[in-house]
Image: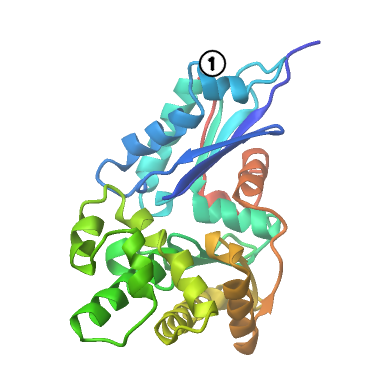
């Protein structure tokens, strides 16, 4: 039987790097984002850790069923931060094409999420994960984007934002500036005392992931009725609705699909959907995920997303 030419599809976020080849799937740690100081090298390292160019490596064996001839179908990557540094995105495409000896496609993970959620059609997608961003793409490929500004200046309502607000509330309750909250006790799973929380977060090599890891705790305590946690969740939803509304004018209809890790929390997802409906949005379920979007973009250069894509042929 001749070798099967399969493609490697990569969703490189700030928390996880997910890879799918055919029916095989593997994941590892993400990277800080292409826009960061060492973003290009870190992106390559994250991809190589789960998709080694050396076909004898363990992860490669997981992704290499009998008959697989490298990744002859190509490698398609949606990488966090790619939209703000297109030169680095193109360089990443070149390096990946050389490393895997195949064609490569690189775009933002937000663009692959959009393509996957709406099946390549125009519309608005709100991504609520470690970061938060909304992207609207019309039929002519015009793009409107809101937020996605990162840990220091934006990503309002994201998992990082929720976790950060939760830890801020712990510190405020501890020193008397804020209301008492059950989050104080929950935070002892991170450090024995709130006094050491700043050093714990500040010493992290990936502060976005460290802060976002506390978001599920905040959501859980909000569901249990803690007033401080409820207030954080309500403000997060307000920020996300504001972000989606900012891009809705870029597309003909106020249709929005929601993706990202926060959607995995049923209670939060329901509240967010209702808030969007109350603002006049038609909320539609995503047709696929970012890996499905990567597959669409790899083989369909005529989609509205093409302006956001870097393509490099096999060397």
| Closer to us: 145 or 185 | 185
**Percent position (x, y) of residue 63?**
62, 25
**Percent position (x, y) of residue 311?**
52, 37
Asked if residue 241 lies left or right of residue 298, the reply is left
**Percent position (x, y) of residue 27?**
53, 38
Q: Quadrant of residue 158?
A: bottom left
- Looking at the picture, the colour scheme in use is rainbow
Residue under the image location 41 percent in, 71 percent down: 162
For mark 1, give the secondary structure: loop
**Percent position (x, y) of residue 282?**
69, 78
| Closer to us: 161 or 134 | 161
User: Is the residue marked by circle 1 packed among few (<14), some (14-19), or many (20+) residues within 10 Å?
Assistant: some
Q: Quadrant of the N terminus?
A: top right
190 w.r.t. 11: above or below: below
Q: Which residue is mark 1?
A: 55
4 w.r.t. 202: above or below: above
Question: Which residue occupies the extreme right position in the image?
Answer: 1
Asked if residue 38 lies left or right of residue 73, the reply is left
Residue under the image location 42 percent in, 53 percent down: 83
Residue under the image location 39 percent in, 78 percent down: 182
């Amino acid at each position: 039987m001749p070798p099967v030419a399969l493609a490697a599809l990569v969703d490189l976020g700030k928390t996880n790097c997910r890879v799918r080849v055919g029916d095989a799937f593997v994941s590892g740690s993400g990277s800080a984002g292409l826009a960061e100081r060492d973003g290009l090298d870190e992106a390559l390292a994250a991809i190589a850790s789960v998709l080694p160019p050396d076909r004898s490596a363990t992860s490669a064996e997981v992704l290499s069923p009998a008959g697989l001839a490298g990744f002859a179908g190509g490698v398609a990557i949606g990488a966090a931060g790619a939209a703000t540094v297109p030169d680095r995105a193109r360089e990443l495409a070149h390096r990946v094409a050389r490393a895997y000896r195949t064609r490569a496609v690189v775009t933002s993970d937000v663009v692959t999420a959009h393509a996957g959620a709406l099946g390549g059609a125009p519309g608005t997608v709100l991504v609520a994960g470690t970061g938060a961003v909304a992207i609207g793409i019309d039929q002519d490929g015009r793009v409107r984007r809101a937020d996605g500004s990162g840990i220091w200046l934006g990503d309002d309502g994201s998992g990082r934002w929720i976790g950060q607000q939760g830890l801020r509330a712990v510190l405020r309750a501890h020193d008397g500036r804020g209301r008492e909250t059950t989050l104080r006790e929950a935070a002892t799973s991170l450090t024995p005392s709130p006094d050491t929380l700043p050093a714990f977060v500040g010493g992290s090599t990936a502060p976005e992931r460290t802060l976002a890891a506390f978001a599920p705790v905040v959501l859980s305590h909000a569901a249990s009725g803690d007033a401080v946690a409820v207030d954080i969740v309500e403000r997060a939803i307000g920020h996300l609705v504001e972000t989606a509304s900012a891009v809705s004018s870029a597309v003909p209809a106020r249709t929005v699909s929601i993706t990202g890790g926060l959607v995995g929390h049923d209670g939060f997802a329901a509240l967010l959907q209702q808030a969007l409906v109350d603002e006049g949005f038609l909320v539609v379920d995503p047709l696929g995920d970012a890996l499905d979007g990567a597959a669409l973009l790899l083989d369909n250069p005529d989609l509205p997303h093409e302006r956001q894509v870097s393509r490099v042929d096999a060397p």
